[in-house]
Image (tube, grey):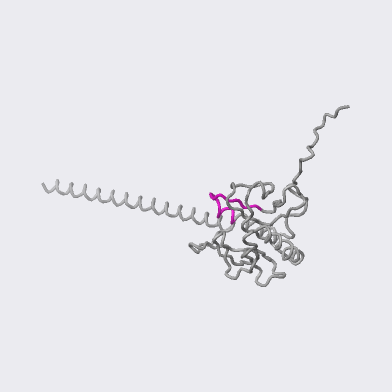
């Protein structure tokens, strides 16, 4: 009997987009991850780049088990927008910068396995952020690729991103190198927009008030002119 069910090609390989594991170890790690994702996504908007968070990075064609899910990765010279997963051999670009929100329980994997993997893949910068300050002195440590080997970043800046990085509590704060301006996190951006809207309303209200005063003054001037004309007529 012939089956009516479709059969997979012997050469067809399935690449999952998830593994059912939690996105992050704690809320603090999740928040740091999502804020970093959104800040960098807004910063790179309009460029040929994408920022992905917790998506599988497949690095060996034909071997779906050879994968890793960086907390945040930035890839340049690719189409903007999200992906369910990222295959290096299809996109043609290796991530330029990867961030891992690390903890005491993931220290060994982040410091040894992932660091070695990203170094071998040619990821230009690898940043470890310890939001709870469990094992990294100063909470933030970056590595930059030099002669195919990672060296500690000592200047606190990201070459590919053209940003300066600082620790701000449980978050990474990013500052533009060209202007020194801080990249606002979603809450700060919303507050800035509210402040801007209020300032615009206040300016419009002041302009309307000035217009009313000008109209009142003009009416008073016209009234005085009329009175002068009346007095001149009476004297004549």
Q: Residue furthest top?
A: 1
87 over 33 or under it: above or below: above
Measuring 80% from the left and 33% from the top, which residue is drawn there?
6
Splitting the image into 4 quarters, where does residue 121 fall? bottom right
Picture coordinates of residue 62, whole percent (x, y): 75, 47
The stretch drawn in magenta includes residue 41: yes
Picture coordinates of residue 186, whole percent (x, y): 59, 56
156 over 122 or under it: above or below: below
**What stretch of residues is rendered in magenta?**
39-52
In the figure, is residue 231 to the left or right of 178?
left
126 over 208 or under it: above or below: below
Picture coordinates of residue 199, whole percent (x, y): 46, 56
> Foreground: 103 or 89?
89
Q: Residue furthest left?
A: 236
Splitting the image into 4 quarters, where does residue 12 fall? top right
Q: Residue furthest front?
A: 147
Picture coordinates of residue 162, whole percent (x, y): 54, 61
The stretch drawn in magenta includes residue 214: no
Measuring 67% from the left and 65% from the top, which residue is drawn there?
129
Measuring 77% from the left and 65% from the top, which residue is drawn there?
105
Question: In which quadrant will I find the N terminus?
Answer: top right
Measuring 68% from the left and 48% from the top, which residue is drawn there?
87
Q: Residue furthest right?
A: 1
> Foreground: 93 or 126?
93
> Foreground: 25 or 127?
127
């Amino acid at each position: 009997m012939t089956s009516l069910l479709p059969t997979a090609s012997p050469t067809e390989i399935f690449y999952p987009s998830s593994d059912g594991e939690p996105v992050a170890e704690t809320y603090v790690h999740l928040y740091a991850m999502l804020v970093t994702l959104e800040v960098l996504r807004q910063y790179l908007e309009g460029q040929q780049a994408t920022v992905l968070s917790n998506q599988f990075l497949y690095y060996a064609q034909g071997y779906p088990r050879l994968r890793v899910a960086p907390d945040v990765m930035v890839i340049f010279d690719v189409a903007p927008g999200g992906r369910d997963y990222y295959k290096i051999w299809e996109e043609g670009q290796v991530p330029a910068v990867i961030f891992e929100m690390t903890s005491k329980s993931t220290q060994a994997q982040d410091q040894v396995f992932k660091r070695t993997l990203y170094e071998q893949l040619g990821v230009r910068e690898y940043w470890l952020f310890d939001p709870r300050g469990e094992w990294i002195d100063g909470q933030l440590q970056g590595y930059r690729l030099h002669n195919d080997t990672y060296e500690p970043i000592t200047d606190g800046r990201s070459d590919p991103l053209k940003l300066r990085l600082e620790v701000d509590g449980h978050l990474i704060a990013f500052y533009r190198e060209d202007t020194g301006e801080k990249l606002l996190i979603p809450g700060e951006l919303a507050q800035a927009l509210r402040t801007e809207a209020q300032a615009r309303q206040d300016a419009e209200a002041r302009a309307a008030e000035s217009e009313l005063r000008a109209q009142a003054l003009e009416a008073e001037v016209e009234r005085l002119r009329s009175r002068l004309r009346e007095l001149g007529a009476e004297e004549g």
